[in-house]
Amino acid sequence: MRKVIVLEFISLDGVIQAPGGPEEDTSGGFAYGGWIGPYADDVQGTIIREQMNLPFDLLIGRKTFEIWAAHWPQHADVWPGVNTATKYVASNTLTSHEWQPTVFLGGDIAEKIRDLKQQPGPDLHVYGSGNLVQTLLKHDLVDAFWFKIHPLTLGSGKRLFAEGTIPAAFEVTASNVSPKGVFIVNYERGGAIPKS
């Protein structure tokens, strides 16, 4: 069975909005785009490159897809795998695009992802895609989180865990702290919530 792995840059207060740049996502008046930049270092970069070089297919939302489709085809030297990976895009509005291979998932997204998880193939990596992640959480479809937790609070912005998250326990499978204080931690599903 394929796993759904959510990879996120996240603030201490759970914000995942626009980590990469000031114009990435200004919705809701968000003014802190690009907040991960000052925390980049070699330790974090090495781990990110290792994750990027694993076998994967992408599972992303429409907005993330549109941002990436405008960028990654021209930067294949940085991340060749993103162009050759199958991109499964949760969208009820897009039905085709020149960035291939791409499959558009409309309608009942949760059911289509359940089916996709049963098919042979590499794990499904989810980057950004805040709305899609909310759907995955509500329908208990996340098998692992790979977080880069940054030492700052943003006070506003789109948060990873919103209402509707299914209770679940996770176990740490890898962890590291970068010299600039970023906690890099992988969590895998660990069964039921333990009770004391």
Image (spheres, rainbow, N blue to C red):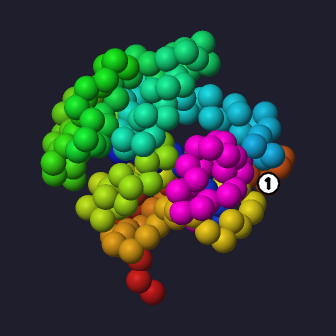
**Horizontal side, residue 177 vs residue 165: left or right:** right
Q: Is residue 34 magenta?
A: yes
- What span is colored magenta in the figure? 14-36
Farthest-out residue, right: 179
Which sits in the foreground, 40 or 21? 21
Residue at the image point whose x is 60% and y is 61% from the top: 29
Instruction: Indicate whether 102 appears above or below 159.
Output: above
Percent of width and height locating residue 157 = 57, 64
Which sits in the foreground, 190 or 102? 102
Q: Is residue 17 magenta?
A: yes
* Residue wearing tag 1: 181
Q: Residues within 10 Å of mark 1 (few under 14, many from 20)?
A: some
Does residue 49 appear anywhere in the picture? yes
Farthest-out residue, front: 29
Residue at the image point whose x is 49% and y is 35% from the top: 67
Percent of width and height locating residue 100 = 33, 18
Instruction: Indicate whether 70 appears above or below 169.
Output: above
Instruction: Indicate whether 36 appears above or below 94.
Output: below
Residue at the image point whose x is 66% and y is 50% from the top: 33
* Amino acid type, label 1: Gly
Percent of width and height locating residue 160 = 49, 62
